[in-house]
Amino acid sequence: MKKIILIFSVFLFTSCTTYLMPIESFEEQFQNVNESSREEVKVRTPYYGISTKYLANTINNITCFDKNNNSIILKNSPSIEIRITEKNEKKTIFYFDRVYQENSIVYGDKSRIPGFEKGIPLDSILKIEIQDGKKNFKYIENDTSKQQ
């Protein structure tokens, strides 16, 4: 029994690594990602084979940093989340592939359900973290740049 608990604990603590993305790096990676540059993708959800379509940013690889400040490249997927902490300590989690920047405002969706978009002024952001939420969302169809 102890062995099972140990294996589960190791998996739990290593499966959800959080990476940092400096604000300058965010601005650089999103400099050409705006509302009109997004492309439609089709995603299979973990809910009984249901799929959904939405507009996603065109970033394929995400540059971020681990806790030792080593550069890490993550492949974008529908399960990657971005956690933004504002200077007032308010935290917002978006799906990374739904994030874009326009007029110094970062826009994102907190849900796959339409209508949950929120904007955060870039100058109010204190910290940006990236994490694979390990949710079973997968790109499907002919979009080979986004498929896994």
Image (cartoon, rainbow, N blue to C red):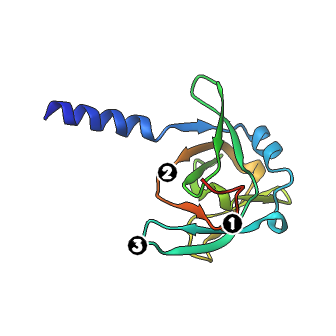
**CB under 8 Å between callouts 3 and 2?**
no
Q: Residue at x 58, y 56 (%)?
A: 92
Find residue 82 and name its label: none
Q: Earlier in the sequence, mark 3 or mark 2?
A: 3
Disc 2 target residue: 133
Label 1 or label 2, whichever lies nearer to me, is: 1
- Image coordinates of residue 71 in percent, x first then y, are 68, 28
Q: Residue at x 76, y 51 (%)?
A: 122
Dot 1 crowding, Cα within 10 Å, few <14, some 14–19, many 20+: few
**CB under 8 Å between callouts 1 and 3?**
no
Label 3 or label 2, whichever lies nearer to me, is: 3
Find residue 48 and name its label: 3
Label 1 or label 3, whichever lies nearer to me, is: 1
Q: Residue at x 34, y 32 (%)?
A: 10
Type of amino acid under label 2: Gly
- How far is mark 3 from mark 2, CA to CA? 19 Å
- Image coordinates of residue 119 in percent, x first then y, are 71, 63
- Image coordinates of residue 138 in percent, x first then y, are 55, 60
Determine the image quadrant of residue 62.
top right
- How far is mark 1 from mark 3, CA to CA? 21 Å
